[in-house]
Image: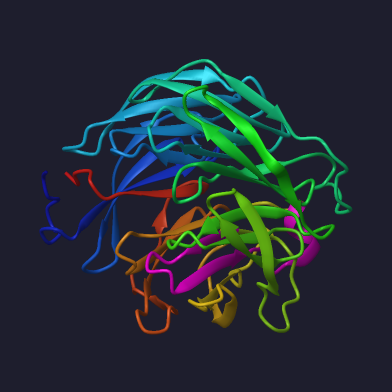
Amino acid sequence: MGELSGVAPGAGLTVYVGVGPRGGGIHRLVLDRATGRLILRDVAEEQSPGWLALDSRQGALYAGLGGNRLGGWRIDRETGKLHKRNARPTGTGGFAHISIDPNDSMVMGASYGGGTVGVHPILAPGEVGESSCIVQHEGDPGPAQPDQSQARPHQVPLDPAGRWAVVNDLGLDRVYVYRADAQGKRLVPNDPPYVQGAPGRGPRHGAFHPSGRWYYVINELDSTMTAFAWDGEKGTLRELQNVTTLPEGWQGSRWSAQVVVHPDGRWLYGSNRDANGDKRRRGIGTAFIAEDDIVVYEIDQRSGQLITVGHHEAGGKNPRNFNVEPSGQFLLCAHQDSDTIVVFRIDQDTGKLVPTGHDPLEIGTPVCVRFALDVGVS
């Protein structure tokens, strides 16, 4: 595979970024892992390609699109360029998050607006079929309005073994578990079908520990982090701990967003958005200030419980998404409202974030960062 001029051989990593309305398409970047510099390569134009997912061979990429659609692209593994294959209606609302089963046979999507989880078969790399399964969530919504006015599935990650799809429903304060039936292209509710969280938590996103023993959920509405014990044989969760994500003295909204476990399993990261309190729903794009925050926890390797290490300013406005690249050296934070991606170096002894000194990369409404370790960087 080719190397990009100006990047040391072997240091380049392909990065794909999904965006909101101001972004214009899927952005292909290169991360220089020698310096932490980000380089924009090209943009595959598309209407609001938000959350992205790559297949297991990194030969195809899928995205939840504007207009309640799901789209697919073939990846040129030598260059990293994307080639559109097709798009299909979701059959429900738009997908806020998608994931792919280990056999690359189906795409699963969480529809925040539709209150549903949907499945589409993969017909060929980058080509999706019509919806094969839609599961409607039902139950009594939580007390926080308007966020909990109905069921609101926000994420559908798979467990490390790829057997179970875990759906965080912000509206019902529940974490659902489904068996990912690749042959039937459907989701089958587990028994029990969900764990019920405390009213008003608003579970948003979750991340599995690489050991497969624990699952961590960041709760958007009360800004807490819940640690669960995970039984991969039974597909069951047991709550171990619930701790705040906020720094002492925080005066802003409780509006947490993303959670990521470091690849070596030692640390956990979560983002807190909006230090301007009640303005957060009324002034998107102008009301936020640069004190949005990333919390760092140490994970106890025996119990799975969390110890707060510290907090770091996120470096932009509305850190809706971030991700840690596969070697664990850098964290890329996408700021939806300042239209920037900021790169931090990760201290390998403490897990804390260290500025790289590079200017943020400007991209309109970035909402999803994905790494492609096996794709060329030309």
Specify the quadrant that holds the N terminus: top left
Q: Is residue 337 visible?
A: yes
The answer to which of 324 and 272 lies nearer the viewer is 324
Instruction: Judge left or right: residue 89 versus residue 121.
Output: right
The residue depicted at 32 percent of the width and 69 percent of the height is 329
Q: Residue furthest top?
A: 130
Q: Is residue 338 visible?
A: no
Specify the quadrant that holds the C terminus: top left
Residue 354, how many percent across, how many down?
40, 78
Magenta span includes 242: no
State which quadrant residue 115 falls in. Answer: top right
Q: Residue furthest front?
A: 233
Give the magenta range. 258-281
Q: Is residue 275 above or below residue 114?
A: below
Residue 315, how many percent across, how many down?
50, 69
Residue 226, how many percent across, how many down?
66, 65
Q: How is the rendered protein coloured?
A: rainbow
Instruction: Judge left or right: residue 364 versus residue 231.
Output: left
Label tally: 0
Q: Is residue 232 above or below residue 211?
A: above
Residue 318, how many percent across, how many down?
60, 59
Instruction: Judge left or right: residue 342 versus residue 248.
Output: left
